[in-house]
Image (cartoon, grey):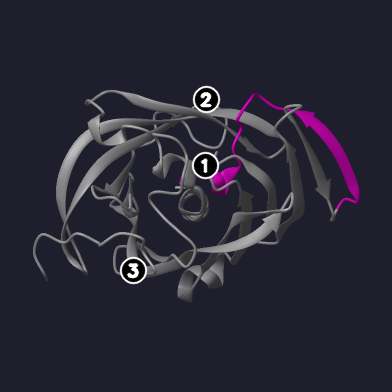
Amino acid sequence: MKKILLFFLFFILLGSGTQKGDAFDVGEWLKFRIHYGVINAGYATLETQEAIRNNKKVFHVIGKGHTTGMSRFFFRVEDVYESYFDKITGNPYQFVRKIDEGGYTKNQEGFFNQESNKILVKDYKGKTEKTISIPNNTQDIVSTFYYLRNYPNVETMKVGESIAIDMFFDDDTTKFKLKFLGRENINTKFGTVSTMIFRPLVQSGRIFKEEESLTVWISDDANKIPIRIKASLVVGSIKADLDGFKGLKHPFLVKAKP
C-alpha cells in the first residue's frame, strides 16, 4: 500500500504544432484527491506561475503532494516538486525536489544546459554536486507532464500508438512512454467528461514496471488535464480523481452535469 500511494503522488506530480503553452497558461491550478475505496489517502496540487530565467519569462510550476488521515498515520508524505521551463520549446531550465516520504528526505536542484546536453545536480542534503550528460530535449518530472499536454497531433493518435520522451529523475534518464488506448466518457464530480485513455510504459526496473496495471484518463478537450488515474490491485483498486481546478486556459467541457 505504501508503494502504491507514493507512486500515485509521484505520477500526479509528473502525470499528458510546437510547444507554445496552448493547453495551459499562468494561473492554472489543479487539485487531485487520492483514495483507496472510501478512504482519503492524500491530495496533490499543481500550480502554474511565471518566473524569469535567462532574462526571459518562463513557466514556473509548483507541484505539492501529501498524505492525509489514516494514510498519514502509517506513511507520512510531504513532497514539493518545481520546474522552470521555456514557454516556447517546453524545455526545462531548472527543477527543485524537496521530499519527505516516511522519513526518507531529499533536497535537490537541477540546472539544465540544453545546448551542451548536460545537467548540474546540487544535493543540499548530501552537500554534493555533479554534472550529468543527458539526451537532447530531456524533461524533468514536472515539465514532462506539461510537455505532453502540448504534444503535437495528440488528438489524432490511433489506438496502440505511443508518445515517447526522455525524462530525468533520480540522477538518471529514462525513456517515458504513454500508449494511447482509446476514448471513454467517465462520470466525475463535475459531470460526465469525455476523455482520452493512456497507459504509461517505461523501462523495466525504473520507477514503473511495464506489467503494472495503471490507466490514465486525460480530458479530451483543449486543456488536456488528468481526470482520473487508476491502478488495479489484487484486492480492489486505488485511484486519483480531479478534485478542483482554477484558471484553465480553455473551457472545461462537460457532457452532462451531475
Asked if the residues shown at circle 2 and circle 3 are in contact, with their CB atoms under 8 angstroms apart, the answer is no
Q: Earlier in the sequence, mark 2 or mark 3?
A: 2
Location of residue 215 by image quarter: top left
Where in the figure is residue 58, as x and y percent of width and height?
61, 54
Q: How many marks?
A: 3
Instruction: State which mark lies toward you, 1 or 3.
Output: 1
Specify the amino acid type for callout 2: Gln
Question: Can residue 254 be seen here?
Answer: yes
Q: Nearer the viewer, residue 37 or 192?
A: 192
- Whether residue 4 sits left or right of residue 101 in the image: it is left
Q: Does the magenta portion include 140?
A: yes
Q: Nearer the viewer, residue 107 or 46?
A: 46
Residue reaching furthest to the front:
55
Q: Which mark is residue 24?
A: none
Q: Which residue is mark 1?
A: 144
Q: Which mark is residue 243?
A: 3
Q: Which residues are magenta?
A: 126-145
Specify the amino acid type for callout 3: Asp
Q: Give how far apart the Cα atoms at labels 1 and 3 are.
A: 22 Å
Q: Residue at x 69, y 45 (%)?
A: 93
Q: Secondary structure at mark 1?
A: helix
Q: Residue at x 33, y 49 (%)?
A: 224
Name the image quarter holding the C terminus. bottom left
Q: Secondary structure at mark 3?
A: strand
Q: Nearer the viewer, residue 239 or 237?
A: 239
Specify the amino acid type for callout 1: Thr
Task: State whether residue 13 is above or below residue 28.
Answer: above
